[in-house]
Every structure is written in structure tokens, then in C-alpha cells.
Amino acid sequence: MYEKSCRLCPRQCGVNREAGERGYCKQGRLRVAKAMLHHWEEPVISGTGGSGAVFFAGCTLGCIFCQNETISHDGQGHCVAPAQLRQIFENLIAQGAENIDLVTATHFLPEILPALQPKLPVPVCYNCGGYESVQTLQKLEGLVDVYLPDLKYADADLAARLSGARDYFPAATAAIQEMARQVGAPVVENGLLKKGVLIRHLILPGQVENSLRVLDWIGETFAPGEVLVSLMRQYTPTDRVRNLPPFDRMVTGEEYEAALSWMYLNDLQGFTQEAAAAGTDCVPDFSDWAPPEEES
């Protein structure tokens, strides 16, 4: 099912995953870490019923500050077949999920695509780190309704240091423009985002200039209201950055306010976060989930 030379993400590893070779994501066949009703996304995503979040094992980015490191770095998860994945989607919808939220899915896309067809009765959200290949995203056209990309870095040195991706900014900005081309301007009905792009930016401690440059690009690239922005304050130091200042501390109120002011100056619409969002209380427990049995 995978190409002999895997080029799903901008890293272009070129490994033969079917033959057991592993690239940057360290993954072979489809692995799901958890499926749940997620109530801690932006209000237009979670709604009242919760987002039907499906967390996939592994990651093509591998940020050293990732709060979900047990699945993104360590690869914790369960092997599932595309038919099981479809069943997971349908089970979440039956439980009242407002949408199906695919979290870090790119490296498993060949096996995910069949599970998205026929079209689901709720919006499909593609929740990713922003480090995407335009060619890969084009395979999702017509299957994804809402894109939830991060735009983490404008600073190449910072991207290289924290995510090993010096080319992050050109790759992510090209990807986000492709996402916007596919789904158009945001459509909100009854308080829920049914279609559109919501760009997330996590402010990092000591990196206000990076945030300002990210917000500048969004403001310069899109007309007001053409995309939504979520300015995130939830950065929480993990063990991997405990001895790596300034990343060993939370974001200060002054840092967040500086970025927030810049967001408004750029006439960007969207969502903000309270200081209480930082911490591990909202990090899912990935140890207590098992997939449904595959139907014979």
C-alpha cells in the first residue's frame, strides 16, 4: 500500500516501509494510539459533544517539547487495519462526536484514505504540525473539510534546533496555502467550524520575535476572516527540555500579551488561551485504549 520510496512528508526519506525500512517517523503500518471524544480543542472544534479525536502513533516532525511524546517519539499505539479505522470513526460519531479529528496522520495516509470513503456524515478535520507536502495534501482534496495546521516557526534556526526541520517555514506556509485553496474561507454553523482553515500558533518561551513573524505572514497572506487563528499559551516544559533554557519555563504573561497585541494589529480573527491552559491536565492518557476487534 505504501510506495517503495516513501515521500509522504517534506523529509523525503525515500525508505521502503513495506520492506521493513523505517524513516524519520519510525513507523511501518497504520498504528492508532487512542480514539476519544476530545473536549479541549477550540470551541468551534469541540462543540458540546466533543471532537472525535484519533491520535496516530509517530510523527514526521518530532518536536523536542511535544507533550504527547509517548506516542510521537516513542511510537506507542496499536496496529489497525483500514476497516477497523473506519469502525473507530463510526463509533465516535455514534457517541456524539461533532467531527472526526485526525491527529498527526500524514505518515499513514495511504491506509487512512480508504477509511475516509464514502464521505463521513460529520466534518473531517486534519490536525497536523504544519510540516506537510503539498503533493500529499492534494490526495485529501474533497475528503477533508477543516484543516488544523500548526504554524510553529518563522525562524529557521529555531525550527532546526527544536524540530530538526530547518525548512519548516517554507514547507508549512506552502502547505497552509494549499489547505486554504482546498476548503476556502471558514464556515461556522451553530457554533461549529464546518469548513475552513484554523491555524494554530504555540508561543514559545523567549521567542516572541518568532511569533510576531508568524503572525505577520498570516496577516500578509490572507485577507481578514479568510483563515482563523488560535494563539496558544499551553507550552509546558517536558523532561527533554528541562536543561535547555529558556525552554525550561512557561510562557510569561508579557510574552503572551505581546503576541496577542500583534495578532490584533494584523486584524486576525480567532481564539486565545488562558494561562491555566498550560500544564499536563489536558494531555490524554494513552495507556488505557484498545482498538475494536477486526470484523471477520
Image: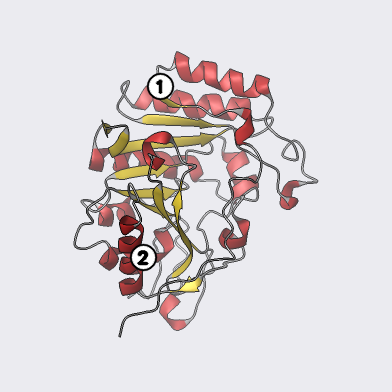
Sort mark 1 into few (<14), some (14-19) or many (20+) by Cα contacts within 10 Å.
many
In the picture, residue 118 is in which quadrant?
bottom left
Q: Residue at x 46, y 14 (%)?
A: 265
Q: Mark number for residue 88? A: 2
Q: Which coloring applies here?
A: secondary structure
Secondary-structure class at tag 2: helix
Q: Position of residue 249 (x, y in %)?
A: 74, 36
Question: Residue 259's x, y, as percent?
Answer: 56, 22
Give the side of residue 287 with respect to residue 148, left or right: right
Closest to the observer: 9 or 285? Answer: 285
Dot 1 amino acid type: Leu
Vertical side of 140 occupied by 201: above or below? above
Of circles 2 and 1, the one toward us is 2
Q: Is residue 148 above or below residue 208?
A: below
Tell me the quadrant of the picture where the C terminus can be found: bottom left
Q: Which residue is mark 1?
A: 268
Amino acid at the residue labelled 2: Ile
